[in-house]
Amino acid sequence: MSELADFLRDTGLNHLDLGQGVMLVVGLVFIYLAITRELEPYELLPIGLGILIANFPLTGLTTFSESSGYQESGIFGIVFRYGLSYWNFLPPIIFLGIGAMTDFGPLIANPKLMLLGAAAQIGIFAAFWGALATESLGFGVSFTLEEAAAIGIIGGADGPTAIFLSAKLAPELLGITAVIAYSYMAAIAFIQPPIMKLLTTESERKIEMKPPREVSQREKLLFPTLAMIVIILVVPRSAPLISMFMIGNIFRESGVVPRLTSTASNELVNIATIFLMITVGAQLSADTVFDRTTFVILVLGLVAFCLGTAGGLLFARLINLFSKEKINPLIGSAGVSAVPMAARISHHMGQQANPRTFLLGHAMGPNVAGVIGSAVVAGVLISRLPLT
């Protein structure tokens, strides 16, 4: 009987507390939404599984310890240490895969759409300054410059960029900022439409746009090459993300390395996604989540995402004041970096207003510009703030 009592004392059930129980339910909710509602399943499913792993007592899967001649660490502790916190190589690999799957054609065909992607980055700066002002506003929490930058990047709606920046500047916030960024990306179909209706008129939503012109292979090869050279020369700290993004796209558009393109856009990015998403979810232990700081970050992230959407919409309307050929302002909301979900929402809202309006091709322009914009902003923030 004493051996049985010792065994029961060593079970996870005996060490499970209320906070961990709640987080296990949260993990199951993520899994449910990914499987039954198909809300960003490639992100929410592994994140949900990571949340479960992080809140099982006594597993040691997320720990990392290292000393002279001795090391005892869990697999996800090692992945977090070297894949994110220390070497931070997983987000650039994701960008390589995204680049190999991206078509720059709509952006090249209509370069002014790049301005919409830039305008949508306003959410990043609003959340950054909001995070710095939380203590003076009476929220009872304060953030350093580095932490404010990690919170602000949520407004870019770009999960890999949020992870990359947080791991560089504020690794203690990595799990929270990454999951909030991906959660808002998954909820984009609920967050953006009300803002789009509020900030545009019905007649604007009905605007029909001409199909984008055909873009030559030469243009598709010159654009990522020149963009990589110019951006990295101006913002060197954006190189890990921008270079991999453009390299993946050059693989795609060259047409001479189909195996490299296939590997980058399939096997490699899938492997990186598995470890990245599970490891991010595994950072959400109960003691990390249940405090006032997490709630404040949640609110700031939502505000940033909404302001980014609004910035793109309003700037599209501003362009129409000076342009003879009107653009449908709905594509401005795609300036956030949630590829391709934001572009699909723009197209869907346009179809609701006018079934003859086809916006998907046009919306991919600011959508891709948003990816580039958020990576550039991340590089600027990293270059201007001291590394932890």
Image (cartoon, rainbow, N blue to C red):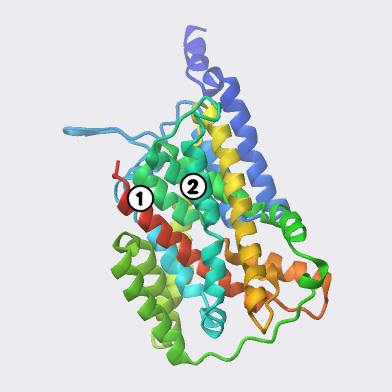
Report x, y in % for residue 304.
57, 49
* Res. 268 visible in picture: no
Q: Residue at x 54, y 66 (%)?
A: 117
The disc label shown at residue 34, or none: none
Residue placed most toward the observer, 141 or 13? 141
Residue placed most toward the observer, 209 or 177? 209
Up/down of 38 relative to 232, above or below: above
Report the side of 177 relative to 231 (left or right).
right
Report the side of 33 relative to 369 (left or right).
right
The disc label shown at residue 152, or none: 2
Residue placed most toward the observer, 134 or 181? 134
Report the side of 381 relative to 208 (left or right).
left
If the image is split into quadrants, where does the C terminus sit?
top left
Q: Look at discs 2 and 1 and give the one toward the viewer.
A: 2
Up/down of 248 relative to 300, above or below: below
Tag 2: amino acid: Gly
Q: Residue at x 46, y 66 (%)?
A: 372
* Res. 110 visible in picture: yes
- The first of marks 2 and 1 along the sequence is 1
Q: Quadrant of residue 172?
A: top left
Residue at the farthest front position: 322
Q: Secondary structure beneath disc 1?
A: helix
**How would you rate the neighbour count of disc 1 (Cα within 10 Å): few for under 14, some for 14-19, many for 20 or more?**
many
- Residue tagged 1: 83
Residue placed most toward the observer, 96 or 358? 358
Report x, y in % for residue 102.
51, 74
Tag 1: amino acid: Gly
